[in-house]
Structure formats: C-alpha cells, structure tokens
Image (spheres, helix red, strand yellow):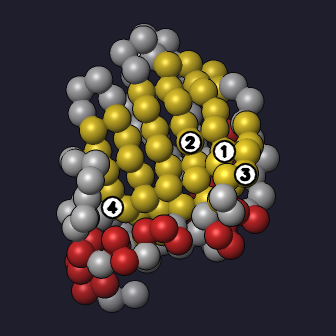
Amino acid sequence: MDRSFCASHGGKHWQHREQQAQLLIDYAEDGDMGVQLILPGELAAVSLANPGDILALPEHCESGALLRESEAGMQVLRFDARCGDVLPESLSVPLLGKRLEIQELEVSMSTPAVRKYFVVHQDCERAIFNIDGDSHGE
C-alpha cells in the first residue's frame, strides 16, 4: 500500500470504525492491567485461544484466563494481567501478525500518566495517531 493511504487514513477512520477490531488496555499504578478486545461483525468469528494470542506480555507479568462473551453481534474477549512494580517497557500485539483477517486495529491505552488512542494497520509501518472524530483524546 502506498504511503498516502497511511498518511490520510486517520481522517477517514471514523467512517468504518464500527467494522474494525478494538483493543482497550487499562494499566493501573499497582501493576494491574485490564485488556479487552472487541471483534465486530465478521471478525467475531476469529479464533483466539489465550491472552498471549492478543497481547504479548513481558515475562514478569502474569495473565488470567481469557473470558469471552457475545454482545450484539460482537465477540468481546477480556483478561486481566498483573505486572507488579515493573512497568512493561513495550507491548506487542501478535494478533496482527497471526490473523490476516484483522487488517486494522483501533487501540486505546491508558496508564496513570497518559492516555493514547491510535490505529494500527497491517499496511502501515507506524501507528496512526491523528484520528479525526477522536473522542478519546491523545
């Protein structure tokens, strides 16, 4: 895909966001992390077996069981993780590399210090941060 798509997609994301997967990560000061993946429409059929299929956590973090529920044609997957006093320096999302049917992922990540909202697309080398219609803030 050409770079113009990646450069302009932020302004168009709102037009199809209901059809895209959403990953919500909430990280608390005490090292607790809540993770929720929302798979709408046809993406609801994507098979994921454990938390590591969604988010690769550092070795010092422990994750709970992957819980699933269906809501209005969507599959919602949730798990909690505990990372203790050592904040993860980075988190990777193996979900994008393994699941070709998921081309785009909207991410909302909040920590006690900052809240980030961005889109990751398979064809773009970087996350897209300037999302028009952004109700989450950056």
Label 4 or label 1, whichever comes before in sequence order: 1
**What is the x, y in percent for residue 44?**
70, 63
Check whether the beta carbons of the residues at disc 1 and disc 2 lie within 8 A of each other: yes
- Residue 105 higher or lower than 67, as above or below: below
User: What amino acid type should be assigned to the residue bearing mark 2?
Assistant: Gln
Q: Is mark 3 on a helix, strand or loop?
A: strand
Label 4 neighbour load within 10 Å: few <14, some 14-19, many 20+:
some
Amino acid type indicated by mark 1: Leu
Numbered circle sitting on residue 127: 4
Who comes first in sequence, dot 2 or dot 3? Answer: 2
Q: What residue type is labelled 4?
A: Ala
Alpha-carbon distance for marks 3 and 4?
28 Å
Q: Position of residue 54 (x, y in %)?
A: 62, 48
* Closer to the eye: label 2 or 3: 3
> What secondary structure is marked by label 1?
strand
Find disc 1 in the rendering and name its residue.
77
Mark found first going from the N terminus, 1 or 2 = 2
Q: Label 4 to label 2, Cα distance in Å?
A: 19 Å
In the image, which is nearer the foreground, mark 4 or mark 2? Answer: 2
Q: In this view, does 23 lie above or below 4?
A: above
Could you tell me if residue 21 is visible in this image? yes
Name which residue lies at 63% across and 38% down: 78
Query: Image height check: is 41 above or below 24?
Result: below
Position of residue 79 measured from the top left corner of the image (x, y, whole percent): 64, 33
Identify residue for label 3.
70
Q: Which mark is residue 36?
A: 2
Which mark is first along the chain, 4 or 3?
Answer: 3
Q: Which of marks 3 and 4 is in front?
A: 3
**Do the CB atoms of the residues marked 3 and 4 lie less than 8 Å apart?**
no
- Residue type for callout 3: Ser
The N terminus - image quarter: bottom left
